[in-house]
Image: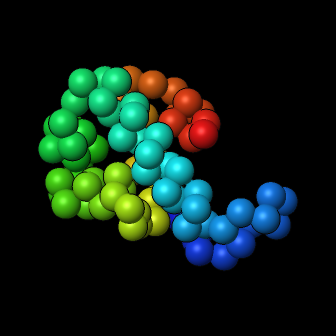
Amino acid sequence: MVISSKPLNNCGMSAPKIRLQFAEKLKEERRRSRLTQEKVAEFIGVSARYYQMLESKKPTAVKLDTLDRIAEALDIPLWKLLKF
């Protein structure tokens, strides 16, 4: 699954706004876990630059399996990472 830039039918919210909310939540949970961006990137098997983009003001699309690995790295359930 990839989060696209198309408007969502049910809530009228665009995907870029959702991506920004996710980026903030991701940063919050990573800091709560006391991990660096580099450590999380290493754990989930992506480049540090890609992970930095996920937490940036212009986050990129992310696949569901990557989200699952991020949640595992942060030691939280996936639903908590997506609750914002």
Nearer to the camera, 56 or 39: 56
Name the residue at 53% across, 50% down. 21
Residue with the most extreme right position: 10
Residue 53 picture quarter: bottom left
Name the residue at 55% across, 67% down. 16
Nearer to the camera, 16 or 76: 16
The picture places residue 14, in percent across and down from the top left corner, at 66, 68
The quarter of the rendered structure image containing the N terminus is bottom right
Name the residue at 41% across, 42% down. 26
The picture places residue 22, in percent across and down from the top left corner, at 50, 49
Q: Is residue 48 above or below residue 60?
A: above
Viewed as shown, does residue 40 lie left or right of 30?
left
The quarter of the rendered structure image containing the C terminus is top right
Viewed as shown, does residue 46 lie left or right of 7?
left
Name the residue at 59% across, 74% down. 5
The picture places residue 56, in percent across and down from the top left corner, at 34, 58
Is residue 1 something one can see in this rendering?
A: no
Tally of numbered discs: 0
Nearer to the camera, 11 or 69: 11
Figure coloring? rainbow
Residue with the most extreme front position: 57
Is residue 13 something one can see in this rendering?
A: yes
Q: Is residue 36 above or below residue 57?
A: above
Residue 68 picture quarter: top left
